[in-house]
Image (tube, coloured by chain):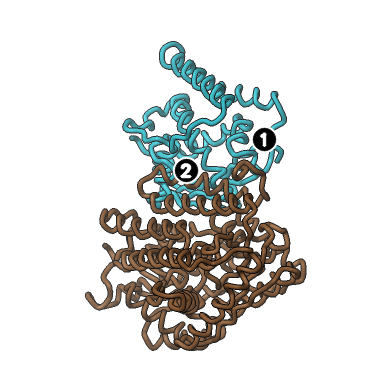
Chain colours: A brown, B cyan
């Protein structure tokens, strides 16, 4: 299916055709309006990017930890290098994502790298993004990103690269240090894109980000109620939103669609399954088949009210009163609110603390650590995390899998792990609890 | 609505319908855009597992396989029966967790249009096997969001197809109640195939 009347790479056309079909399918059902709102704005976002690229506007490539406000403010086109691989998994053909992974490995990139990076590198090797005017690399949201920044630089070794080096701390000094790097990034972007940054335009972009933040906080509030009415499969979308859409009207509309859908579902109060257990999903979501969340709800009564990719911390507000304040706000948000960037730098302290906060706030019964095999940081601290859960008397399921590659842990194997945990650990434990001691949702 | 009491009856009714689908191979390939997918249907209460295998030509229906399929749909037999009748649109079924989908979204979206077409032929199939009792009376919701037909040629062909459908319906209801709609569609499929090479698989 051509996009804007032009033939594109097959992978882009597959994503586009699938999005179009999904939007058309789910828009027809009132229960699907939230999902449809997300899908139609995702389509708008892609159309906007293709239309600007077709018109010859410069493109800037970046990796997963960067937020594109400065790029939007310059009026150029942002492309996260893992974007197409992620879209192929979530709203396209999973086989394309696996092909990207295989291509990267066949060209010598280590199989031990994160699949998000390998798939991104595979898409780069296939030449699926418009040629960049310059590159922005960042060492967040996790250390693995260094690999993709290196690959990006190697792939386009004549294109200028700017690297943002985020320290492993989360204090004000860190924010100021990163804000200083963003200040240096501006003339770099201006020089290579030929655009001049207008601060008033950046202010508007930051205001859009602030409105988006408000919707995300509202969304979290509606999802924290028990029972959770909105499907578990949308719990992880904050991460996607921040990487690709931050500061754009598409991102704002997606956040609004999510929040309003969550509110409407709570107010309507119609439920289609019996909620028996609530879990904080504390690692990477099952992007390769997000429909498995429907199975968890329908067959196990297991709800994921929030996961680490969905959690949006409260330090995201950007003060737009001055240039310095905006850069400080953007830096703080990128370092301390971007899912994973917040938890996967430095020590395990924040990683564990955030889990405990989410567990309490979202009235969870248990935790599920879906251990993405390349997440060295979470596996490195798994002993501390298990110990903390044991002390807090929180049942925890830990298993190895890969968020973009079902060949590591298959659908059936994942079903088996979840079913055994819920039916043999979580539900019997809830059944033994004294009335009132737990959340009392069994049998609702 | 009378229910499907056991697996044998389910296999006879829904399984029997699926086993007739190879007759419509060219039409199904047009609907699924020639995508080589294997759609697994897993029904329960009573149980039935079936595959629509579009990886080979003509397509093959199996009700005795344990293959996982490239994409899948699972649900209660009663709900699936409502999908076939057009009483439960696929999107509603998924949103209400009555239908559990599995597999690549892109491939699923290629398979889903099958369920837009089936409700137009399933009731006449039920009549043909003497199970009109399974046809539920009531409000039939729109199966799919109304889409404008783009392009003058598409509009002409759609109008002709509507006219042919209306004529078939008129004849079946007023003149020849035993008119075989599947045979008519099969003939249309043969015409499609004769006119040009089918989707390559």
Kindly check if marks 2 and 1 are in contact, taking CB atoms under 8 A apart as contact: no
Q: Secondary structure at mark 2?
A: helix
Q: Quadrant of the C terminus of chain A?
A: bottom left
Residue B33 location, x and y as percent? 62, 38
Residue B49 appears in view: no
Q: Nearer the viewer, residue A358 or A154?
A: A154
Q: Pointer 1: what residue?
A: B58
Quarter of the image where one finds residue B55: top right
Q: Pointer 2: what residue?
A: A24
Q: Are discs 2 and 1 located on one and the same chain?
A: no
| B171 w.r.t. A256: above or below | above
Nearest to viewer (mark 2 / mark 1): 2
| A175 w.r.t. A300: above or below | below
Crowd around label 2: few <14 · some 14–19 · many ≥20 (10 Å): some
Instruction: State the residue at coordinates (37%, 38%).
Output: B3
- Mark 1 belongs to chain: B
Instruction: State the residue at coordinates (42%, 56%).
Output: A253
């Amino acid at each position: 299916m051509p996009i804007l009347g032009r033939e594109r790479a097959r992978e882009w056309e597959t994503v586009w055709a699938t999005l179009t079909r999904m939007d058309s399918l789910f828009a027809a059902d009132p229960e699907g309006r939230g999902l449809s709102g997300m899908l139609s704005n995702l389509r708008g976002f892609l159309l906007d990017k293709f239309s600007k690229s077709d018109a010859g506007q410069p493109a800037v490539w970046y990796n997963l930890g960067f937020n594109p406000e400065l790029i939007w403010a310059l009026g150029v086109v942002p492309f996260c290098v893992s974007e197409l691989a992620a879209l192929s998994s979530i709203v396209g053909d999973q086989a394309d994502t696996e092909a990207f992974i295989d291509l990267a490995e066949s060209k010598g990139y280590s199989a031990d790298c994160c699949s998000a990076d390998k798939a991104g590198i595979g898409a780069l090797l296939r030449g699926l993004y418009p040629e960049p005017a310059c590159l922005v690399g960042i060492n967040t949201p996790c250390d693995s990103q260094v690999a993709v920044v290196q690959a990006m630089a190697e792939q386009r070794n004549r294109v200028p690269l700017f690297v943002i080096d985020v320290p492993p701390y989360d204090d004000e000094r860190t924010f100021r240090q990163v804000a200083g790097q963003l200040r240096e990034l501006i003339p770099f972007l201006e020089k290579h894109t030929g655009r001049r940054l207008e601060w008033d335009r950046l202010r508007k972009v930051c205001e859009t980000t602030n409105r988006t933040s408000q919707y995300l906080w509202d969304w979290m509030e509606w999802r924290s109620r028990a029972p959770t009415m909105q499907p578990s499969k949308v719990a992880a979308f904050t991460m996607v939103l921040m990487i690709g859409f931050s500061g754009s009207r598409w991102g704002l509309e997606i956040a609004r669609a999510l929040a309003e859908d969550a509110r409407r579902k709570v107010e309507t109060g119609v439920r289609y399954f019996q909620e028996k257990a609530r879990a904080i999903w504390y690692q990477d979501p099952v992007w390769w088949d997000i429909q498995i969340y429907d199975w968890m709800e329908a067959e196990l009564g297991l709800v994921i009210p929030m996961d680490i990719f969905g959690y949006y911390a409260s330090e995201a507000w950007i003060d737009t009163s001055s240039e310095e304040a905006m850069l400080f706000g953007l830096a703080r948000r990128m370092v301390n609110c971007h899912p994973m960037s917040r938890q996967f730098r430095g020590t395990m302290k924040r990683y564990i603390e955030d889990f405990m906060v989410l567990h309490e706030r979202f009235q969870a019964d248990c935790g599920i650590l879906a251990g993405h095999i390349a997440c060295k940081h979470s596996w490195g601290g798994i002993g501390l995390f298990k110990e903390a859960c044991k002390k807090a008397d929180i049942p925890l399921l830990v298993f190895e899998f890969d968020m973009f590659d079902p060949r590591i842990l298959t659908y059936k194997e994942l079903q088996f792990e979840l079913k055994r945990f819920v039916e043999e650990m979580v539900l019997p434990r809830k059944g033994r609890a004294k009335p009132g001691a737990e959340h009392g949702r069994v049998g609702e | 609505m009378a229910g499907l009491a056991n697996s044998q009856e389910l296999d006879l009714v829904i399984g029997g319908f699926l086993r007739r689908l190879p007759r419509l191979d060219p039409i199904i390939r047009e609907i699924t855009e020639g995508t080589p997918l294997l759609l697994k249907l897993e029904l329960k209460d009573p149980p039935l597992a079936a595959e629509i295998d579009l990886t080979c030509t003509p397509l093959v229906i199996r009700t005795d396989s344990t293959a996982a399929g490239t994409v899948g749909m699972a649900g209660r037999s009663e709900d699936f029966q409502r999908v076939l009748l057009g009483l439960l649109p696929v999107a509603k079924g998924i949103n209400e967790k009555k239908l559990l989908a599995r597999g690549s979204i892109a491939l699923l979206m290629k398979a889903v249009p099958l369920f837009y077409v089936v409700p137009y032929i399933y009731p006449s199939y039920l009549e043909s096997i003497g199970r009109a009792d399974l046809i539920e009376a009531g409000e039939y919701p729109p199966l799919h969001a109304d889409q404008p037909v783009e392009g003058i040629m598409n509009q002409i062909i759609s109008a002709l197809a509507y006219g042919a459908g209306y004529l078939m319906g008129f004849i079946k209801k007023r003149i020849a109640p035993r008119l075989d709609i599947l045979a008519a569609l099969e003939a249309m499929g043969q015409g499609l195939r004769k006119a040009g090479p089918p989707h390559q698989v």
